[in-house]
Image (spheres, rainbow, N blue to C red):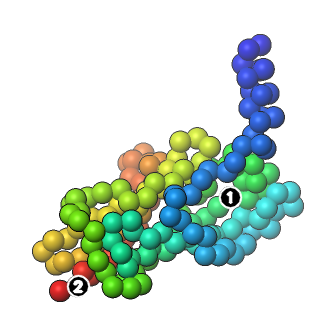
């Protein structure tokens, strides 16, 4: 009985809950509808921009799929693990202080149930390049490998 009351409370409160928040520095650049949904919003691909907080002049553009329909509109759907990243020098590239060799730069919840998309910055000191890797905390299939995509931005020489 308690479980039924708790579940009913969650279902009632779900429409009032805000969708998962984007990282503080994220900016929605745009979106395109992909699949028509009779109820709720359409499935879509969104493009967000993330500016690296420790490297001036570097912006990362992340495209990813968002599930629509009733569940997607209420923030209850699990978005597919489909994304792509492109980071570019959008100004003079200036590193603020020392960068660790590997650091999670952005972390965004994309599911009501514990799935996150993360962007890590990996420093290739030999080639003087910043490598940005987008990956999901949700493993895929039996091998446990998460979907991922990579891009790189050279540091000035």
> Is 118 drawn above or below residue 88 in the view shown?
above
Tell me residue 23's x, y (percent): 51, 58
The mark found on residue 139 in the picture is none
Q: On the rendered structure, is 120 left or right of 59?
A: left
> Is 129 drawn above or below residue 116 in the view shown?
below
Residue highlighted by disc 1:
67
Q: Which quadrant of the figure has residue 132?
A: bottom left
Dot 1 or dot 2, earlier in sequence = 1
Q: Residue at x 61, y 64 (%)?
A: 65
Disc 1 on helix, strand or loop?
loop
Whether pointer 1 and pointer 2 mark residues with C-beta atoms closer than 8 Å, the reply is: no
Tell me residue 34's x, y (percent): 71, 72
- Considering depth in this image, is 156 or 44 the residue closer to the camera? 156
Look at the image and tell me whether residue 45 can be seen.
yes
Q: Quadrant of the C terminus?
A: bottom left
Q: Residue at x 44, y 71 (%)?
A: 51
The crowding category of the residue bearing disc 1, from other C-alpha atoms within 10 Å (few below 14, some 14 to 19, many at least 20), is: many
The crowding category of the residue bearing disc 2, from other C-alpha atoms within 10 Å (few below 14, some 14 to 19, many at least 20), is: few
Q: On the rendered structure, is 17 left or right of 105?
A: right
Q: Residue at x 38, y 85 (%)?
A: 91
Disc 2 on helix, strand or loop?
loop
Residue highlighted by disc 2:
156
- Name the residue furthest left: 126
- Name the residue furthest top: 1
- Name the residue furthest front: 97
| Mark 1 or 2: the one toward you | 2
Q: Quadrant of the N terminus?
A: top right
């Amino acid at each position: 009985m308690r479980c039924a009351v708790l579940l009913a409370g969650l279902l009632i409160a779900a429409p009032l809950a805000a969708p998962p928040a984007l990282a503080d520095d994220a900016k929605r650049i745009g979106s395109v509808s992909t699949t028509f949904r009779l109820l709720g919003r359409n499935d879509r691909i969104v493009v967000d921009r993330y500016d690296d907080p420790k490297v001036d002049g570097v912006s990362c553009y992340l495209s990813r799929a968002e599930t629509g329909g009733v569940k997607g509109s209420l923030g209850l759907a699990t978005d597919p693990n489909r994304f792509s990243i492109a980071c570019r020098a959008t100004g003079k590239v200036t590193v603020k202080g020392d960068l660790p060799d590997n650091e999670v730069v952005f972390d965004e919840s994309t599911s009501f149930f514990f799935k996150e998309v993360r962007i890590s910055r990996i420093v290739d000191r030999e080639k003087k390049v910043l490598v940005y890797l987008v990956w999901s905390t949700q493993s895929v299939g039996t091998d446990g490998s998460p979907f991922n995509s990579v891009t790189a931005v050279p540091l000035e020489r």
